[in-house]
Image: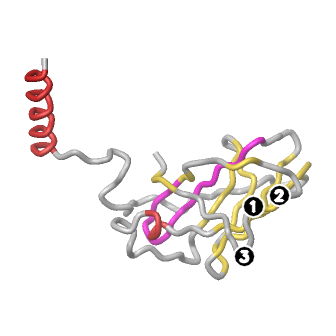
Amino acid sequence: MRKYVSVLVLCTLFLCTLVGCKDKNAPESFNGNVARPAWTTSSNHDFTSSMTAVIKVDLAAQYPDIAADFVLMDNDLLAAFSGETCLGVASPNEGFFYLYIGAPIGVTPTSVTLRYYSAHYKNLFEAKDAFPYVSDTQQGNADEPFIPAFVCAP
């Protein structure tokens, strides 16, 4: 049995060397050709509840090998979603996204998912984790912004 396991391990190592073992979720580059999304919130602005968030996007800190050249650009966008309903959209302002997150009539969000468009990479990213939607609260602030971890959007 021990000999069989040793042969299996050696074969696996050989195949990894031959074809390369990479994290399939880690891209070679974030460069894409995605157009800037037209994310919008409810046009009537009748919100039943709201919260705010101060968010910092730092792909270079999260992916130092892939995103060492990352910079925020004026054309970047960050949006908050509950499912496919857009709850808020913001552009960068002095290194942060000041996001107003409003729940329109008929939508009762329990969590917020962030989507980020990088004009630098012309690509979309999604936050790995959602955060709870809690009316009349703030997620992060200018002294301690919320810094979500992002992955390339599928």
Q: Name the amino acid, label 3.
A: Ala
Number of other residues with Cα within 10 Å of mark 3, as a class: few under 14, some 14 to 19, many 20 or more = some
| Three-letter residue code for mark 1 | Gln
Please tell me whether residue 115 belongs to the stretch shown in magenta. yes
Residue 70 versus residue 14 in the image, above or below? below
Start-end of magenta stretch:
110-125
SS assignment for the magenta stretch, majority = strand
Residue 141 is drawn in which quadrant? bottom right
Q: Secondary structure at mark 1?
A: strand
The answer to whether 103 appears left or right of 152 in the picture is right
**SS under mark 3:** loop
**Mark 1 neighbour density, 10 Å: few (under 14) some (14–19) many (20 or more):** some
Q: Is disc 1 in contact with disc 2, using a CB cutoff of under 8 Å?
A: yes
Q: What is the secondary structure assignment of the residue under circle 2?
A: strand
Residue bearing mark 2: 51
How far, Cα to Cα, is label 1 from label 3? 10 Å
In front: mark 3 or mark 2?
3
| Rendered location of residue 137, percent (x, y) | 84, 58
Where residue 81 sits: x, y (%)?
Answer: 69, 49
Say which mark, if any, is on residue 139.
1
Disc 3 versus disc 2: distance between alpha carbons? 15 Å
The kind of residue on which mark 2 rests is Met
Mark linked to residue 142: 3
Residue in the image at 45% along x and 53% along y: 152
Residue at image position (57%, 67%) is 57
Q: N-terminal of the two: label 3 or label 2?
A: 2
Mark 1 and mark 2: Cα distance apart in space: 8 Å
Q: Is residue 112 left or right of residue 51?
A: left
Residue 19 versus residue 50 in the image, above or below: above
Which one is in front, 44 or 124?
124
Verify CB contact (< 8 Å) between mark 1 and mark 3: no
Report whether 22 appears left or right of 58: left
